[in-house]
Image (cartoon, rainbow, N blue to C red):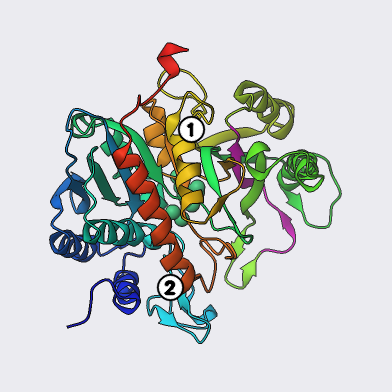
Amino acid sequence: EEDPLSSSSIVSRFQRYLQINTVQPNPQYYEAADFIISQAKSLSLEYHTVEFVVGKPLVLLKWPGSNPNLPSILLNSHTDVVPFEHHKWTHPPLGAHIDSHGNIYARGSQDMKCVGMQYLEAIRRLKASGFEPVRSVYLSFVPDEEIGGHGGAEKFAESDEFKKLNVAIVLDEGLPSPSENYRAFYGERSPWWLVIKAVGAPGHGAKLYDNAALENLFKSIESVRRFRASQFDLLKAGLKAEGEVVSVNMVSLKAGTPSPTGFVMNLQPSEAEAGFDVRLPPTADPESLERRIAEEWAPVSRNMTFEFKQKESIYDKFGKPALTAIDSSNPWWNLLEEAVRNANGKLGNPEIFPASTDARYFRNQGLPAIGFSPMANTPSLLHDHNEFLNQAEYLKGIEVYESIIKSYASYVGRDNFKDEL
Ligand SMILES: CSCC[C@H](NC=O)C(=O)O
Ligand SMILES: [Zn+2]
Ligand SMILES: [Zn+2]
């Protein structure tokens, strides 16, 4: 039988996990849970499954520490992946094909089945080396991150079950880096999904008149675009990072009078709406943005209305911006930097995650959470066609987690200096 620590068996376990169809909106969660539990058994980890929502299992694993009084470490990953257009891929998205460069192609290879398996492989290596944790290490494999995490991490982070784990620090997903420096995230932007609606006078398609619905909507779209450009300019000029500006992108447009052959071409419709994905940095002023929406993007003077499909607060449950400290008040940050360095890796400056991850639910509880996916020299292909991860980079990431878990699980200093400052 093959050595379970050989590179080829490590890579083939990753391929098996990638081949499980956990594609939204119909993920085969039980198949994924069975696979994770089989890994837990082979590693002699404690395991148990919770269903905060029926049919959506969350698998929790435990590597008990020698001092159960010390707060624990939580390594979180989501098991679901986003859909794909398989004809636009060069290799089947659930095939986990490895090409001649060693690139493993699959949906989830970057987001984030890699990380879930890397945690497990790091533990496999640590166990083989005889390492014993002082703090307990938990691994949560959660459902539904890609559709908002409401049936997974959100309920988990608010549960009594979770409080009993006495977690000190959470690690969750980050983003790949095209350079040799890994990226790490200490906060994220909050999603506001906005729909603005216009009404107006209907009329003949040949007539020029004021106050048509689409004219009213386009005035708003122009205003949104001016704001978008001002934010994008800050980014392009290098004055701000991606996570530090407000992004707003139009994601839907709805208008027109349907006919059997398409749309009626000579009728100006009386209603029109546009949808926007807006993201607010944790340092933004939510009230001023909301004022801008009401006064400039959807003004009553043009009879416009707006609605939020999603509107998340930038604040945690204590009313503070949900940011993880990256100064001396948070020992886990320095430990992470040091552990990555010890594994011959480099960490770039900490960033704000541009989109949303489950880490926000832990930060909302006041816990430190760091977004980190050890993929350097890798183009970011999350949610894109031909998502891949190079196998050498994957194996390197396992060594990085080995170093991090070793450092975190051995740390016996104070968990948080905040209260003493
Ligand atoms: C608001 S829940 C959506 C979460 C999703 N996460 C990853 O892409 C995102 O759009 O950021
Ligand atoms: Zn993800
Ligand atoms: Zn994703």
**Disc 1 crowd, CA 10 A, few/some/many (<14, 14-19, 20+):** few
Kindly indicate the quadrant of the structure image that contains residue 385: bottom right
Front residue (pair 118, 107): 118
- x then y, percent, for residue 137: 25, 43
Q: Position of residue 130 (x, y in %)?
A: 21, 55
Q: Is mark 1 within 8 Å of ligand 1?
A: yes
Residue 137 falls within the magenta-colored stretch: no
User: In front here: 341 or 270?
Assistant: 341
Q: Position of residue 413 (x, y in %)?
A: 34, 27
Q: Which residue ends up furthest to the right in the rendered image?
A: 208
Q: Secondary structure at mark 1?
A: loop
For the N terminus, which image quadrant? bottom left
Relative to 417, is 63 on the left or the right?
A: left
Asked if the beta carbon under badge 2 is closer than 8 A to the nearest atom of ligand 3, the reply is no
Residue 59 to residue 332: above or below: below
| Residue drawn at (29%, 76%) of the image | 9
In magenta, the rendered stretch is: 264-281
- Side of 51 relative to 421 (left or right): left
Identity of the residue drawn at 27% across and 71% down: 5
Main SS of residues in magenta: strand
Q: Earlier in the sequence, mark 1 or mark 2?
A: 2
Measured in 3D between alpha carbons, the distance from the residue under mark 1 to the one under mark 2, in whole angstroms, is 31 Å
Callout 2: helix, strand or loop?
loop
Q: Which residue is mark 1?
A: 312
> Residue at the spot x=31%, y=77% of the render?
12
Q: Residues within 10 Å of mark 2 (few under 14, many from 20)?
A: many
Q: Which mark is residue 106?
A: 2
Q: Quadrant of ligand 2?
A: bottom left
